[in-house]
Amino acid sequence: MQGERSAGDEQWSSRTGFVLAAVGAAVGLGNVWRFSAVAGTNGGGAYVLPYLVAAFVLAAPLLVLEFAVGRAYRTDVVGAFRAVRPWLAPAGWAAVGAVFVLLSYYLVLTGWVLAFALAALLGREFTFVAFTAGWAPVGYFLAAAAVVAVVVSLGVRDGIERLSKLAIPIVFLVLVGLGAFAFTLPGAREGLTFLFAPRTDALADPGVWVAALGQVFFSLSVGQGVMLTYGAYLPDEVDLRRSAVVITVADVAVALVAGVAIFPVVFSFGLEPSAGTALAFETLPTAFAAMPGGRFVAVAFFSLLFLAAVTSAVSLLEVGVSTATGNTRLSRRAATAALSVGMVVLGLPSALSYSAVDLRLGGVPVLDALDGSVGTFALPFTALLTVLAFVWLTEPAIVRERLGGGSIVPLLRYAVPIVLGATTTYRLVTAGRGGFGRVPDAIHPDAGVASLLVLGIVCLALVGWYWTREQQSSRAARRGRTERD
Ligand code: PHE
């Protein structure tokens, strides 16, 4: 009986609705907090090229695969794996479990962002250290969880899609505004150079590639069943490849614009670009407090981050809710309520790890322990299972038909698993050796601005080329259809 959904009531209203919801799932804390942390510790410009290559060559094809599989089976993650081989169902459960752990601490971070936004709005004195010395982080975690639960209980179209249609345009506009503002700062040139000046020497460093890959997969929310779940609500006529390209471009653009907004601030105030996780929550707020109009910037920055985080957290909860409604008799409301209790219980230790309790696991805060274990290693693992089930164990003809043939099939069949396997091994081997921090060498001060321009033009050209090609092929397909009739 699994996977029998009443068609129609759980579907995106249009291609735009779907694309915005998927962009909402992808664009999150990862694009701002994690991207800048990873870029900062990997020498900025050294890392942007591997990041772009990984996004378009490896992550985007996986995005297409997940959408196609979701739409083909119109069911939840577990149901999709089970449809390939009954013994694969545990792979689906593994993905759901990993997503749930991720959600539990993602909501803690979302709560922090909410606290920062409110404090800036009310003009209150606020530091991360003081905030996490009390109980407030637990309260904000519960608030964030409640918001996410309400959105998901409203349903695919009335909850998730409606929120994304509202939030994503705001996120884009505010971010572009912040990026433009950053150009007026004294450290703009230095910041852009740090982020965009290519450094060919670093391309030979596997650590940079591994970091970029991990970041891209996380940022695009691929390999964990999130996009598969969203694919199940896709109308039949939506073009998956074109949507995947649009979603990838949007996600990458948000990360890069966030970098354009953040690194000029970092260099204007003499902050440490390689501060890592602390960058968004500790270093930047100090800079906001010190700059003219900083309160306004802080409100804008943290509100957009909150919106972005909520649309991602919603997608994570939806994976669980769709699995629960698909495999039990629970209604959406009941499933959301039950799973919300679960996510609060599971997230509590993470929330407490940055509070008066200072809860630790093996010496590290629970939140960091979860992010470093499940958050880092579950994704490549479940991504491999996804490729195994839906490419290797599925009829080649079906795979080709679902994906539309071309280079995407060998990329998914060989490149993605090889690269995922290799990078995960590398990570396991080098784990514990710390980050890959390095200081950029002397580079021409205008190199960053120039590269940014080139990058923008190349992106536009690529999107334009892809668009016209798709346009042509859909016209050809339409012509073929009319001739046959
Ligand atoms: N992509 C989201 C972000 O960038 C996080 C996420 C990861 C969501 C994996 C779902 C699955 O914040």
Image: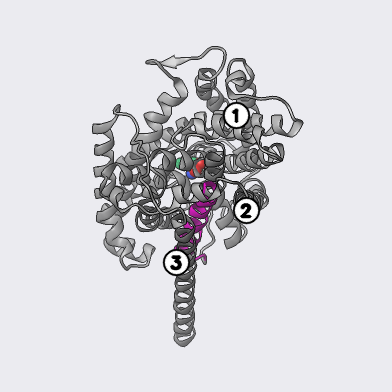
Few, some or many residues within 10 Å of mark 1 (<14, 14–19, 20+): many
Find disc 1 in the rendering and name its residue: 112
Q: Nearer the viewer, residue 312 or 464?
A: 464
Give how far apart the Cα atoms at labels 1 and 2 are: 26 Å
Which residue sits at x=44%, y=66%?
458
Give how far apart the Cα atoms at labels 1 and 3 are: 37 Å
Q: Nearer the viewer, mark 1 or mark 3?
A: 3
The circle drawn on residue 267 is: none
Q: Are marks 1 and 2 in contact (CB under 8 Å)?
A: no
Which residue sits at x=62%, y=24%?
127
Residue 161 point in image, percent of width and height: 62, 51
Q: Main secondary structure of the magenta part?
A: helix
| Element assignment for label 2 | helix
Residue 9 point in image, percent of width and height: 62, 52
Find disc 3 in the rendering and name its residue: 458
| Residue type of the residue flagged with mark 1 | Trp
Find disc 2 in the rendering and name its residue: 180
Residue lying furthest right:
122
Residue 453 point in image, percent of width and height: 49, 63
Indicate yes or no whether the magenta region holds residue 250: yes
